[in-house]
Image: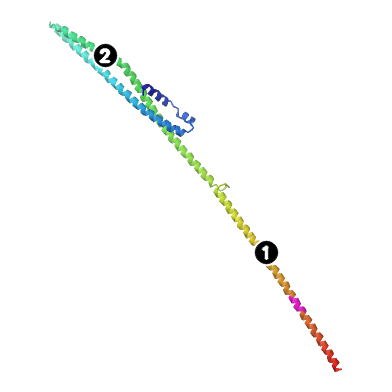
Amino acid sequence: MSKQSILGRIAQLAKANINSLLDQAEDPQKMLDQMVRDYTNSIADAEAAIAQTIGNLRMQEQDYQEDVRAAEDWGRKALAASQRADEMRASGSGEAAKFDNLAKVAIGKQMQSESEARSAEPSIQSQNEVVDKLKTGLQTMKGKLDELKSKRSELIARSKVAEAQTQVHDAVKSIDILDPTSEIGRFEEKIRREEAKVMGQQELAASSLDAQFEALEDVGQQTEIEARLAALKQGSQGQLGAGSSQTADASGAVDAEVVDR
């Protein structure tokens, strides 16, 4: 993955407005889960790309330092050869030109190393800027990831609370004794019907018992009537018997009187 694409992706994810995205999501929790996965994967890719970029930068810096050291080394060699040439020239030796040529060669090498070092400086500076941006973007992404995880935890907690509240509400509603549609309401209504049935049976039994007592009273009255009637009849027969006896006595007396005559 190129540095430019990594930078663009980091910038895009770092600028993402999590709250706005969640407001537009049909299922915020699923979207948060997906965003956490995307950010985690992007951070892993960014870390790999940044590590490679830093590694390349350090290699360029090492090459730059080598060019700087080489330029310094060739400069010392050129100075030493030039001084040696001056010494030989002062002593009348014919080898002075030889050391001057060596000094020139060393100066050429010094200039080449300096040129390579100068040409590497802009690239190194640019790479340092890129690495700084990548590091900053990576830290921003990690902050966003922490924010996402926090949002997800908060959302899950709120979802569980809402679910628990719904369950409690449903449970309370199901045991509302004032609600005729609740189980307790239906059970109470059933008991009331049973109680009404018992009351009806008791009332019916009471009515039947009263009727039986009334019947007994009627029987007692009829019995008394029959008893009184029997008593009347017995009384009448007694009176009739007494009358017949008196009649017989009278007839006997008459008959005796006739015989006497």
Tag 2 or tag 1, which sits nearer the N-term? 2
Figure check: 88 above or below 133: above
Per the rendering, the mark at residue 147 is: none
**Quadrant of residue 69 within the rendered picture:** top left
| Residue density around tag 1, few if under 14, some if 14–19, many if 20 or more, within 10 Å | few
Which residue does the image show at 43% across and 34% down from the upper left? 152
Per the rendering, the mark at residue 114 is: 2
Q: Secondary structure at mark 2?
A: helix
**Quadrant of residue 6 within the rendered picture:** top left
Question: Relative to 180, is 142 on the left or the right?
Answer: left
| Residue density around tag 2, few if under 14, some if 14–19, many if 20 or more, within 10 Å | some
Per the rendering, the mark at residue 211 is: 1
Task: Identify which amino acid the numbered label 2 is placed on.
Answer: Glu
> In the rendering, at what x and y percent does residue 129 appear?
35, 20
**Quadrant of residue 156 within the rendered picture:** top left
Magenta residues, dominant SS class: helix
Question: Relative to 241, is 175 on the left or the right?
Answer: left
Does 168 lie within the magenta span? no
